[in-house]
Image (cartoon, helix red, strand yellow):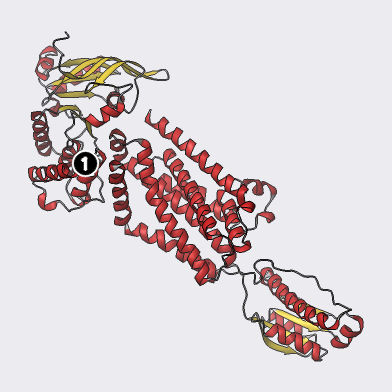
Amino acid sequence: MKQLLAFLRKEFLHIFRDYRTMIILFGMPIAQLLIFGFVISNEIRDANIAILDYSKDYQTQKIKEKILSSGYFILTVDLKAENEIDAVLKAGKAKLVLVFEHDFARKLEKTGKAELQIIADASDPNSAEILSNYTRAIVNNYMIGINNGLTTKTVVFTEPRMQFNPGLKSVFMFVPGTMALILLLISAMMTSITIAREKEMGTMEVLLISPLRPTQIIIGKVVPYFLLSFINAIVILALGFFVFGLPMRGNLLLLISESMLFILMSLSLGILISTVSKNQQVAMFISMFALLLPTMLLSGFIFPIENMPLALQYLSYLMPPRFFIVIIKNIMLKGTGIMFVWKETLIILGFTIVFLIASVRKFKQRLE
Amino acid sequence: MVDKYQNSIIKVRGLTKRFGKFTAVDNLNFDVSQSEIFGFLGANGAGKTTAIKILCGLSSPSEGNAEVAGFDVYKQTENIKKNIGYMSQSFSLYEDMTIVENIRFYGGIYGMPLTLLKERTNHMLNRLKMTEYANKLIKEIPLGWKQKLAFSVATLHRPKIVFLDEPTGGVDPITRRQFWDLIYEAIDIGITVFVTTHYMDEAEYCHRVSIMVDGKIAALDTPDNLKQQYNAKSMNEVFLQLARKK
């Protein structure tokens, strides 16, 4: 025990002496979250729109008010004729044009149907899709309001309801993804680098010849980074909660336990990486190449897994962060309990065990 | 025979280590007695490192027996580790830690009581004339200092045997000489020194020298006897003759 404490003190000295790594360690998650949260955003606010209203009755007036007061749209041009639409879109004065047909209110009341055409500038397909969805949602909402009063006839619009994230806030996607990415990177990269450094400097030999047991060496390497990663997890969650208004619908304790399990998995992966890499550069390269890119691309962090080619979908099953992201989203956004995430939990546990067994085997091989 | 090696601290009998078909260490037999400086020479790849790994309890032999400090290399590696010290050519000090922090760390992993550790630290820093630099980082001190410090750290817990694996790589002859003063001080307090080196001038400082060629011990005697036997002026000539023979 005393030996282990001496070893831990040494590890913390390494960590605190290396202030550059410290900055990366704590600066990276914060910077990344802020970048993903504020800059790279799928969310659109204050989009310029134009309106061509042939009817100009009380119904179109109310719908317009609803749309413009939603905060998503700003009316830039009030069009008079159809032939102006093209010009407005081409000039980029509006991203979306709404066209109310003649006799909108009368048709709505008589037949229960009226037409609102949405013309979007699809040269940017993502925002076109998002803007038209917003508009449809607002109009639907309005219609539900009228129908409640009027009974009988309804206007049928397709209804894209954005469950759990009605504002389609992209930060809800990025916080879980960033958390998985950061925890994996820090835990795996840092442990693999510090173990590889001992090998490179020749101090590993001395440690192995000393009365320290290999398990003590591994524990001594893992504990400090476990603590650091854990603090990081809390910082990311707090940022998500306080800065980005991410809801915490499920059990916080469950979320923290799942995070600890994921950190442990990443640490065992780090040990495994270190056993196959000769020096720090190799360890760093493997961590970056084998962890950062696949996590970004295949874990469902940025690109939805359902949209991937089938082969890549299968490949994504090998990405532990994929399962962790599902767990975080389930707990935070949907508020579900262990009953809904036990499968993912078991999978991460499985990864941990496989990595640990493989590392111990490799470790022993190296000694021989 | 038995009487002669009664107080031998390392006993090696028929020690063999094979990796697949390759025999790295082939039927070694030797004894090292207490307070002896035992030189373990050989070209690169002659099997020195493999033999040292076995004696330090890091690896098990394929055949034969060996006892280090009275403990068996098959079953009592834990005990062996507690009773030996080790210094490699990379000096194994942590560059981003101070002199005192390094000493405390090694004292700590060998389980030394804090009061004893402090006492020895002070004594050691005095001896090395480094007291005023105690809080300097290792990366800020010269190579020769690191080397002396690494040796002192390796003997801090007063092991029965200290293994030195090419301890003087990359330093000038004067610093090497000063380093050997420390080795002589260590044997004065009863520590046995087991040293490998490339420098033949250092071989002359050893009490006895063994020369390994292709996994076998080709010669083992005092430097003077070896020179006489091979009709050579220096250990370097002895070494060359043995290495050429194959």
How many badges with numbers are in the image? 1
Looking at numbered disc 1 in the image, what kind of residue is underneath it?
Gly
Q: Nearer the viewer, residue A35 or A186?
A: A186
Q: Residue A217, image x and y in percent? A: 35, 40
Q: Position of residue B34 (x, y in %)?
A: 14, 22
Split into 4 quadrants, where in the image is the C terminus of chain B? top left
Task: Report which quarter residue A73 is drawn in.
Answer: bottom right
Location of the N terminus of chain B (image quadrant) = top left
What residue occupies the far top of the structure in this picture? B1
Residue B105 lies, with reference to residue A140, above or below; the image says above
Judged from the image, the secondary structure of the residue bearing numbered disc 1 is helix
Query: Which residue occupies 24% across, 39% down?
Result: B111
| Relative vertical location of residue B3 with respect to residue B205 in this rendering, above or below | above
Q: Position of residue A103 (x, y in %)?
A: 87, 88
How many C-alpha atoms fall within 10 Å of the one at disc 1: few (<14), some, or many (≥20)? many
Horizontal side, residue B192 vs residue A255: left or right: left
The residue that disc 1 covers is B107
